[in-house]
Amino acid sequence: MNPSTPPSFKNPRAKYNFQGRTCSITGVGSYVPSRVLTNAELEKMVDTSDEWITTRTGIKERRIAGPNEFTSDLGAQAALRALQHAGVSPEEVELIIVATITPDMPFPATACLVQQKIGAHRAAAFDLEAACSGFIYGLEVAQQFITSRTYDTVLVIGAEKLSTIVDWKDRNTCVLFGDGAGAVVLQNRPNSHGLLTAVMGADGRKADLLFVAGGGSRCPASAESIAAGMHYLRMEGRETYKSAVQAMETAAEEALRRCEIDISRIKCIIPHQANRRIIDAVVERLGGKPEQLFVNLHKYGNTSAASVVIALDEAVASGRIQRGDLVLLVAFGGGLTWGAAVIEW
Ligand code: UT7
């Protein structure tokens, strides 16, 4: 499906109450590594400038995980903070979904490693791969389990150590990405609202815009694949940019339409933090106002599946989102994938 044409959303459901079940966010948390990599430092690594990075993307710095700090460690820290915020113990968690494109290893799932690290021994655990849209995909999957009465308590985590798949010699990409994680606790909470709707979409015809070619079954890791840099992320920046604006607009409009909510009623718009120009273009097309936006990309760059949930955590912690506020999440990523969600906080 082409992101320029509206996807045919098959599920017309728009109400938040599913036969008495709700999918409420009862806790949110995030974690970023302490090491800050500034634009000034990147100027010494590749032919770039703070001025170029700032004006083209809005990014000023990003966080880089240490050599012994893995995606599962970032995810576990974020999860523990979300559980503490919710007042939920790890033993109460029934399912852990980790959205990531940088798992600790091809298998076992990073979700299993997080399960062990936080002591959530009762939980089923799996990874979900939808690139930068992964967290919103995770919300929708969790909602299905909760509203179908399969589980009452689900952890959805977006966690990435993108510094391990960035080619630090490629100025087209290395200035954009950073490491970090965020998590939410989702629970059935009668008499509260929570997730009103989530929209997901994909267009595999554009898979070649953003990818890591090596290390899978098509091109297993070998001396040749390493020498050719096939274990690094590659991107067609300009085409990705165009598709991102179109797909995020379409997904957000569909999510709002399903809930019968006008953009003016949204208190906080939290977009995937990839590029300030993409974010501003999407909000303008949606008819939103700059003051509705929450942006923290200047501090962290693009953290893929973690970006929306890190921003959600910061928006809540800073008081930008209060109980009862309507929040719009919207994302776009490799695949291509896209997604949007409306939450009543
Ligand atoms: O998570 C979702 C996936 N990713 C994205 O959403 C990224 C989407 N794309 C973008 O954000 C933008 O396309 C970029 C930030 C990647 C690039 O911005 P742009 O305005 O589209 O620049 P461009 O690709 O058209 O390149 C303009 C120039 C080129 O030089 P020439 O060919 O005009 O001489 C690039 O080589 O800028 C050059 N360039 C740089 N110069 C300094 C590319 N990267 C850099 C750099 N520093 N880091």
Image (tube, rainbow, N blue to C red):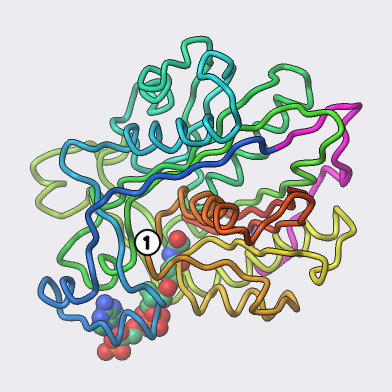
Query: Which residue is located at x 42 percent, y 16 percent?
Result: 119
* Residue 102 position by quadrant: top left
Q: Residues within 10 Å of mark 1 (few under 14, many from 20)?
A: many
Residue 201 placement, left or right of 15? left
Residue 290 lies in magenta, yes or no? no
Q: Is residue 60 above or below residue 66?
A: below
Residue visible at 57% across and 38% down in the picture:
184
Taking the spot 41% from the left edge, 22% from the top edge, the residue there is 118
- Residue matched to label 1: 300
Ligand 1 found in image quarter? bottom left
Query: Is residue 32 found left or right of 137 in the rendered image?
Result: left
Residue 65: give x, y in percent of width and height. 24, 47
Q: In the image, is residue 23 part of the stretch drawn in magenta? A: yes
321 or 179, which lies in front?
A: 321
- The image position of residue 45, as x and y in percent, is 11, 71
Magenta range is: 4-24
- Mark 1: secondary structure: helix
